[in-house]
Image (tube, grey):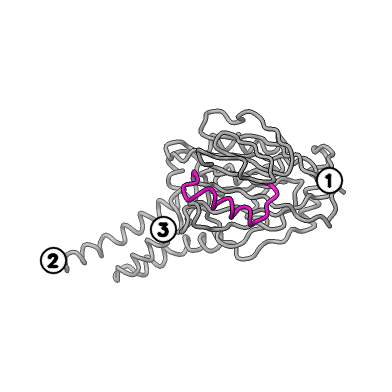
Amino acid sequence: MGSWKIGTGFARVAPILSIGLVAVWALGQILRDRNWWTGLMFYFPTPVLVACLLLLLKLSRTSRRLTLGLLIAPLAILLGVEHQWVQPEFTTTEISTIDMHESSSAPDTAAFDATPDLIPLRLIHWNLARGVMGWEKQWRHIESLDPDIIVLSEIPVLFDTKTLTGFDVLVVDEMAVACHGSMTKTVQLVRGGALQARHVTCQLSEGPLEVLIADMTSSIAIPRDPYLRPFVALLADRKIDVSVGDFNAPRRSLAFSDLPPGYRHAYDAAGAGWSCTWPVPVPILAIDQCIIGPRLKPVHFQLQSTLLSDHRLQILDFEWLPRK
């Protein structure tokens, strides 16, 4: 008798719960992080919603049609937006558009004289989670990937730059940048303290690479958009080539959906597979970003999971675009 009452009660609650979850999610997808309240709804992970609806579909026999109908939109986002099935090709149309944008604004550098025969450079970004899984193991994994430029977030407290043999290392706040060449950095560029942003110039043999590194607080009490807007404006203002970091904000945030002309997300331009970066081993939010500028051609972008951090690695292979 008691189990029958529980089953009847669940059958009544299940449709209301399903509709409520989808309503919160849908409102977040429409308004996104326009303000703090809508941001909280926007951060409700689509994979979690799909999992909840599938569970309700299995447990409730009386509202299966309703649940199946509610699954359509989240599944479409999950399979069509959060997951990119095929790596896009970098077309000549994109190159022409970028050339037109660059011709009026970018200064001449050695990088623009690069030829298509050059070997692509590799940039790696990784949130180390303070190195709790072992900095030595993390470094061995990074080294095995043969990077040219390394950007690390949430570095260990006792971070030893001498470990990065063969690299010049610059420690900035709780981040580190390493490359085969000298580097210069700017002061903090975004006011308020919630988003650490620094412009680092890496003097490579191919020419100067302008890198904008970032690390956003993980506190959900702080709205993201007021900090992301001025950050995105810095990309064009400072003629940034590539920006990476742990933004603790999804790739589809309003500010990230309105990048300056010529800038694009590396995942959208040259990535494939599951786009979420945190938390490993079951990433459900795409909060680590890589944005590339007009001077670079993305050859390949990969997100790699390990058991050495709760964040996935970002691996970008790129070439310099020659100026016509």
Is 132 covered by the magenta stretch? Answer: yes
Which marked residue is nearer to the observer: mark 2 or mark 1? 1
Instruction: Say left or right for 52 vs 320.
Output: left
Disc 1 residue type (three-letter) = Phe
Disc 3 residue type (three-letter) = Leu
Density class for disc 2 (Cα within 10 Å; few <14, some 14-19, many ≥20) is few
Instruction: Say left or right for 76 vs 23.
Output: right
The disc label shown at residue 49, or none:
3
- Considering only order in the chain, which callout, 2 or 3, is on the residue closer to the N terminus? 2
Secondary structure type for disc 1: helix
Is 249 covered by the magenta stretch? Answer: no
Secondary structure type for disc 3: helix
Q: Who's the residue at 69% across and 46% down the image?
A: 166
- Considering only order in the chain, which callout, 1 or 2, is on the residue closer to the N terminus? 2
Density class for disc 1 (Cα within 10 Å; few <14, some 14-19, many ≥20) is some
**SS assignment for the magenta stretch, majority:** helix
Calculate the distance from the C-alpha at mark 3 to the C-alpha at mark 2. Answer: 29 Å
Q: Which residues are magenta?
A: 130-149
